[in-house]
Amino acid sequence: MDICILNPFFYPYNGGTEKVLLEIYKRLAKKHNITVLSAAFPGSGGDTEKFGIRIVRLKSRYINLPGLPLPWPLMEGLNDAVARVDADVYHINNRYLYYPGALGAIKSTGARLLLTLHNALPKGIDPLTDAGGLLYDLIWGREVMRRADRIVGITKSVLNTTVPKQMSYKSKVIYNGVDAERFKSRNGNSRVKKLREDIGGEEIILNVARFTGQKGQTYLLRAFSEIAKERNRAKLVMIGNGPLKKRLRRETERLGIGRNVLMLSDVKEEALPLYYDSADAFALPSLYEPASLALLEALSSGVPTVASKVGGIPEMMKDCGLYSRPRDHKSIQKAIETLLSERDLSRRLSESGRRLMRREHDWDRIANEYEALLLKLAE
C-alpha cells in the first residue's frame, strides 16, 4: 500500500503531532511505501529518507502572526507534489493548511482521504481564540472533514467538540501512545541522581508543555509561589518554548520565585526521560487540552501527576492522577501538595499510571489500528 502523509512539519521537528506520526509510520514503513510531504526548514530542503520513510520537504515561506503557536508555512508546489506521489491513501494531519487545490489534487488521483484531528475546536482558551477557531471551522475546517472518507480523533473529546453530528458516522477514536521502554522509572540511575543534584531541589515539580496561554502555566506559577512559602527547597522545572516565555519569566520575578523556577528550552528529546524520572510530581494545568503526549510520558515514567479536568485528559489519565480545576491556582496548589505529602497515594498513582500506559497506549497497538483503517480505506 502507498500512503502519503501531509503535515506542515516532520522529523526531526519534535512537536506532538510530529512525534505521533513518526512512531506510527516508522512501524508501517516496514510493510508499506510511506511518503511525507512537509515544509522545508529555513535553509534546508530536498528529499531525504529516514526510518524507511521518504520525506519530501517543499520550499516554503513562513508567516508569523500574533496568536499563532507556530510559524505558518506556505509550501510551494504542494498540489503538484500531491499528484506526483499518486498514493492509495492520503493522510492529512492539520486541517488548517490544506485548501481546495490540495484536496482537488488528492481527488484527481482517485485516492481515499484520511483526516486525523490532533487538535479540537478551541474552547476555554480566551474569547478571541475560541471565536477564531469556530469561524475557521465554519468557513473551511468542516469542509475538510466533509471531504475526508474517514476521520480519526485522538480522543473522544476531540470528536465530540469538533466533528459535526452528521459526520460522526465516519469518525473513530485512535488514542496516541507512549514508548514505555523509554519512559520508565530507572530506580536511582546515576544520571538521574546527577540531574537532581544539578537542579538542586529537595522536591522537584515538572511541567513539560509549550509556553502558550492554553497550557495554564501562569496559574501553575501562582500555585508554586504558595507551595514555595512552606517548601522553600522545592524547585519547579518547566521544559518548553513558545511566545509566553518572557512573560512567564517576568512572572517568576514578580512572584519572588525566580531562584526556584528553572525554565529550559533546549532539552534534547533523548534527555527527556531523565527529567521525568527526576521529578517528584508532574503538573499539567491546561485550560484546553485535546490530548497531551507529555501527560502520557509522565504517567509511563511513573511520575505522580496532577492535571486539569479538561478536554481529553480524563480519558487518558482516568483515575491514575489527581485533577485540578482550570484557572484555579489554589486547586493546583492543593493537588501538588497532596502528591508531595501523601507518599502512599503517590506510589499507588505512579504504579497504576504505568500499568495504564502499557495496557492502552502501546505504539505497536496504535500503529496496528491505523494500518487496519488504512487498508480498509484502500480496498
Image (spheres, rainbow, N blue to C red):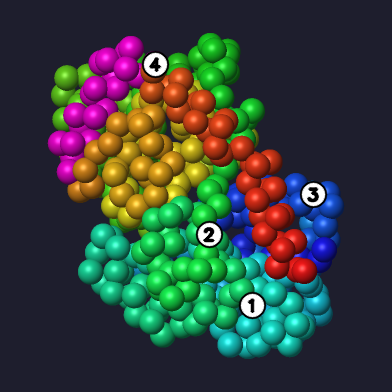
- The CA span between labels 1 and 3 is 24 Å
Q: Which residue is mark 2?
A: 172
Foreground mark, 2 or 4, reads: 2
Depth check, mark 1 against mark 3: the one in front is 3
Q: Which kind of residue does numbered mark 3 sit on?
A: Phe
Question: With respect to residue 44, does 268 lie above or below?
Answer: above
Amino acid identity at mark 2? Lys
Packing grade of label 2 (10 A; few <14, some 14-19, many >=20) is some
Mark with earlier residue (1, 3)? 3
Q: Decide: marks 4, 3 in contact (CB < 8 A)?
A: no
Mark 2 vs mark 3: which is more N-terminal? Answer: 3
**How far is mark 1 from mark 4, CA to CA?**
48 Å
From the image, tell me which residue sits under label 1. Answer: 75
Image quadrant containing the N terminus = bottom right
Residue 347, label in figure: 4
Q: Which residue is mark 3?
A: 51
Residue 375 vertical position relative to residue 165 in the rendered view, above or below? above
